[in-house]
Image (spheres, rainbow, N blue to C red):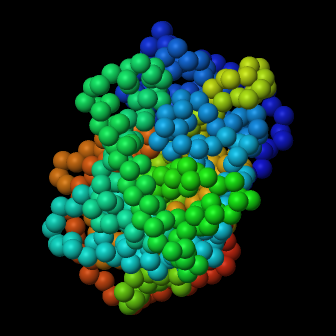
Amino acid sequence: MSNAVPETERAWTTGTAPGIFPSVSHPIALFRHPLGFLNSLPARGDLVEIRLGPLRAWMACHPEVAHQVLMDTRTFDKGGPLYNRLQPLMGDGLVTCRQDTHRRQRRVLQPDFRPSRVADHTDMMAREAELTFRGWRAGDQVDVSAATMALTTRVMNHVLFSDSLGGAAAAEVGDCLAAIVRGLFVRTVVPVDALFRIPTPANRRYRRAVDRVHAIVDEVVAKRRQGRPSEDREDILETLLRAARDESSAVTEQEVHDQLVTLLLTGSESPSNCLASALDLLARHPEAERRLHAEVDAVVADRPRPGSDELPRLTYTRCVVAETMRHRPPGWLFTRITTRETTLAGHRLPRGTTVLYSPYLLHHDPASFPDPELFLPERWLPGRATADPHGAMLPFSTGNRKCIGDTFAVAEATLALAAITGRWRLRHLPGYTERLRPAATLGPRSLVMTCEPRAHAPGTAPRARALASRATAAARAQDPRTAGDNGADDS
């Protein structure tokens, strides 16, 4: 995907979201029918005013407008309802910190997310994916949402803590995340603090979940501090502790905690949703599923699982991941706040204005993606120069606040998807209907599917061999559009 802001001059349009009483109707619509509400906004203008209770905000509905917001991080800093709600949870970690501390924080963590380090984790990712389905049996009804969350939490446990987080604690983190993501969304669309200080059962669940995640991370850090410093450890906790011991780094003990909480939550929740959504969508689209199976059978062949050697050749599998992130981006709604008076889409915004952008809205605009409701992994095959002509594909954001883990996440999803679909075909239960209810992230929350074992002879079918040959050739022509600046193929 392109990160350059197009320079074409155009006449921008502004408007207001539909609703007779905006302060009431907009939050209700965003809460009850969020995806439909978002899809209605581009018809109102390139920059559209919405109301979040008493708060007046502006939604960037055109890719160029969104790029201006994301590329000018000094003017459009992290802030607004979403980040105000994330602050008590993640503190001043990499996701929520202001621009003036972001560069320093990112410099500390960046080495752990370089492509070479991601490559070191690929075999571990595939092993954890295999562990996910090891106990499945033909005809079992599997909670796919829970299984993918367990998988991504184990992966983050390894990367962050070298598996210091016990199995019970890892499972508890997954349970806490479910309560947190539900609570964050309602706190974003109805930014009235007094409502969430009332000791309702939902508010108490949310507070308990937040407190417990903080306590679990503190317990792991305390145990590590009790031991002797190790130069052999290669996890992120050790990276942060070394930085904290270096007086010139300005990393505090609180920052160590905040970064670990941030990476644990974002690195578990969003990849889990992406993988569960991919399995859900493949079950609805048999032709895409058939092409994926053919590639996996050809590339993985008789190996027990895909690994670092196979990852660059899983071209169509990466296309499935990319199209899943377009169709259902886990991070679907974000807020920024202006740090000074500025002009956006020809409209003057005062300092302190809340600006929103939605990858879901941008990814479903037919002006950028024809037939946006269709699931078409072929959009992202190498050489498809028209796949994203307007730079609207922003699953990882862009600019210097682009997700630090984009390459990691794409590699994890690609390997996990190949490992699972190489052995199993997942089917929806009879009578299943889609109930996609966004929370702080977008994805299926309680997806239960039936397991069917796959009987196949990898690499024997002529079509499978042809797909493998094309995949190998295509891997040499890397396509950076599916994972921000680094690119999915850099995984």
- Say if 449 sits above or below 16 in the image: below
Q: Which residue is nearer to you in this view: 403 or 297?
A: 403
Residue drawn at (61%, 52%) of the image: 252
Q: Residue 33, position in %: x, y?
A: 40, 29
- The total of numbered circles placed on residues is 0
Q: Residue furthest left?
A: 139
Q: Is residue 397 visible?
A: yes
Screen quadrant of the C terminus: bottom right
The answer to whether 70 appears left or right of 467 in the picture is: right
Residue drawn at (63%, 43%) of the image: 97
Q: Quadrant of residue 148?
A: bottom left
Q: Residue 490, position in %: x, y?
A: 64, 71
Q: Which residue is nearer to you in this view: 64 or 170?
A: 170
Screen quadrant of the N terminus: bottom right
- Say if 275 sits above or below 135 in the image: above
- Say if 159 sits above or below 62 in the image: below
Q: Which residue is nearer to you in this view: 58 or 231?
A: 231
Q: Quadrant of residue 486?
A: bottom right
Residue drawn at (39%, 69%) of the image: 164
The answer to whether 135 appears left or right of 413 in the picture is: left
Q: Residue furthest top?
A: 20
Q: Residue 406, position in %: x, y?
A: 58, 60
Residue drawn at (43%, 29%) of the image: 187
Q: Is residue 317 visible?
A: no
Q: Residue 132, position in %: x, y?
A: 30, 70
